[in-house]
Amino acid sequence: METQRQKKIAGVIQKDIVDILQRAAIDGGLKGIIISVTKVSVTTDLSIAKVYLSIFPVKAAQELLEGIKSNQPLIKHELSQRTKHQLRRVPQLQFYIDDSLDYIENIEKSLKGDENPIENRDLLDKRKKI
């Protein structure tokens, strides 16, 4: 269960990280790329912030994630400048690709297509009798 403090810090980080990453993409000449921060979760000791990114188009996501990770110290510095009146210490940033939208899309596809586990029971794992 996240505390109010964790949620507040996550919100502050999320808002500023979006600005930082979008400005970096524009300054880097990356046109047509959309980077959004879908979620930020902060550990209870406030030392680590896990930042989940959604990058469009998806084919550019892995390469961009590597670039973001390699620039993590610069991003953290920029974040500390923006949040110096709100946060005493900026947590260590860890970046991940948020694939939950792909996961949802796969579920929708399987429900619409031939692989609908509701209609075709053979696709489901058999229950073990105890």
Image (tube, grey):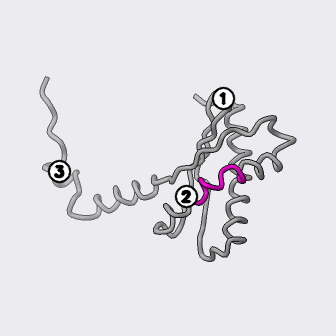
Earlier sequence position, callout 2 versus callout 1:
1
Dots 1, 3 in contact, CB < 8 A: no
Q: Farthest residue in the right direction?
A: 85
Q: Amino acid at mark 1?
A: Thr
Q: Position of residue 22 (x, y in %)?
A: 68, 64
In this picture, residue 108 sits left or right of residue 29 = left
| Residue 50 forms part of the magenta stretch | no
Q: Is residue 59 above or below residue 107?
A: below
Report how far apart the C-alphas of labels 1 and 3 lie in the structure. Answer: 41 Å
To which residue does mark 1 refer? 3
To which residue does mark 2 refer? 65
Q: Main secondary structure of the magenta part?
A: helix
To which residue does mark 3 refer? 123
Magenta-colored span: 66-75
**Residue at image location 79% in from the left, 46% down from the top:** 80
Earlier sequence position, callout 2 versus callout 3:
2
Q: Position of residue 108 (x, y in %)?
A: 35, 59
In this picture, residue 97 sits left or right of residue 4 = left
Report how far apart the C-alphas of labels 2 and 1 lie in the structure. Answer: 28 Å
> How crowded is the residue under tag 3: few (<14 C-alpha within 10 Å), some, or many (20+)?
few
Q: Is residue 62 above or below residue 129?
A: below
